Image (cartoon, rainbow, N blue to C red):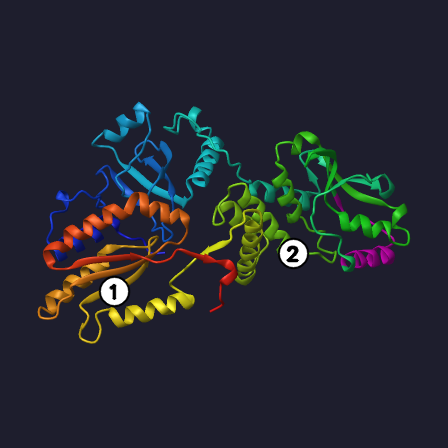
Amino acid sequence: MPQVNYETKIENVVKESANVDLNKLNVHIPGTLPKQIVEKHIEYDPTFSEAFLYRFTNLLNGKIYLGIHKGQPYDGYMFSSKNKEFHKDFMDPNSQWKYEVLMYGTFEYVGAVEHAQLKEANAKDNDNYYNNSNGGSKIVLARIKVLQSIVKDIQTDKEYKGCKMMLISVKDLPDNAVQVREFTLDPEHVKSLRDIINDRRSLGHLQVIVLKNRTYGGMTGDLIIDGNHSIEAAKTSETGDEGIMPTLVISEHLHKHLTDLEIDLMATMFNPREENPTLKTDLPTISRQVCAMRLQGMDSNGKEIQDYKDGFHLSKKQKSKVSKLANEMYLEVVPNTSTWINYAVGEEGRKIKEKIKNEHITNDNRTGIFSKCYSTAKYGSQNDLYDMMIWNRDNPHNKITTYKIRWYHKDQKFKDIWKDKWKKNNEYMIDELLKDKGIKRDWTYLDSTRSKLTTKKS
């Protein structure tokens, strides 16, 4: 995605087109970063997220300060650190810094990512960090890479941190093992495994993974996280119920740090060995786990959920289906009887486009109206101001007299942000810029939601 130069784009357009002294306006216009910031990486955020995670790196000594901010880059905020050493180094006119925006998202989710990174580095006691604390968060992020590493180690080495694969009699496998996987046993897959057992008269090609003495969902027992189909196939085969099964029992101290959610996620990552017919984790099961992560506060576009889905090598179409299913499951738990109207598409969108077509500066500008429809999540005044000023310059006898916008909100978050932070300032700025140009502002707000029960397919 191309990087937008926030520092000059708005300021230059407004100055050149309106000839107004921006310093006299009571609005924030993106400014330049301090001169000691000699490197920067700030990608454009098309979703206008609530918050972002940023990092300052001292290029002279390599020390880092990590922080979060509820707002947008270039809104006047730098950092909130109370670290005197950081202040001293940052204010040194000879210092050189790199400034990066690492990610965007909700304030709670970004705070959880910050806490996870600071905790991993133990920043408060790490001489390579300026942070005085490791932060904190109510959200516990799923450690997808850690889980994938555990699964890979077990599948590759058939052991895990000293726990080795053993041969255990099928009859000795616990009958009361807690079942993690939420889907029922697949009869066809059981039959395929059973046919192989009957043909080979052996269980050596199978495996079972057990977490010893695991408390899960309020129950305590030996928790089977892989091999349920293998056990069922062995018990129902001609002779397998008398055989011995390769079983890896992982000690309690090696899994007690994993959350129940992480156990569920890891269980879906396991597959039988390559020579077996494999039962792939189905899309509804993956979707349930994505929904579970979202319910715990993780962002649907966050790294944890994206890493989890990437681990299943899903196509774009399959990822889209998982997202759709997970969202439907999420809304069942967090019910919502209305839906936010996107006026960029559908029947509502077509009606708005037709109105704008009849109003906008077409047909020799008979209306005198510069007409647009915008989501409050994506509005940028600079292009409109430029187009109106250039039109009036080139058409002195047929000028634009009204700047008309129909607004809609993407969701409640963007509605609140617009109402609390941007509406008043944008109205003031536009009025100030246009009042001497003979252009009046005409802004209206479209209906935000409609009942899901009356939604029509377009």
Give the labeled residue for mark 2.
Answer: 282
Front position among marks 1 and 2: 1
Q: Residues within 10 Å of mark 2 (few under 14, many from 20)?
A: few
- Residue 454 lies, in percent from the top left, at 50, 62
Q: Does residue 400 appear left or right of residue 221 in this picture? A: left
Give the labeled residue for mark 1.
Answer: 371
Residue 108 visible from this viewpoint = yes
- Residue 344 lies, in percent from the top left, at 38, 63
Question: In the rendered structure, which amino acid carries the disc numbered 1?
Answer: Ser
Magenta highlight on residue 100: no
Q: Picture quarter containing residue 444?
A: bottom left
Q: Give the range drawn in magenta.
A: 189-208
Q: Picture quarter containing residue 158?
A: top right
Question: In the rendered structure, which amino acid carries the disc numbered 2?
Answer: Asp
Q: Residue at x 33, y 53 (%)?
A: 376
Q: Residue at x 70, y 56 (%)?
A: 279
Q: Does residue 308 appear left or right of residue 213 in this picture? A: left
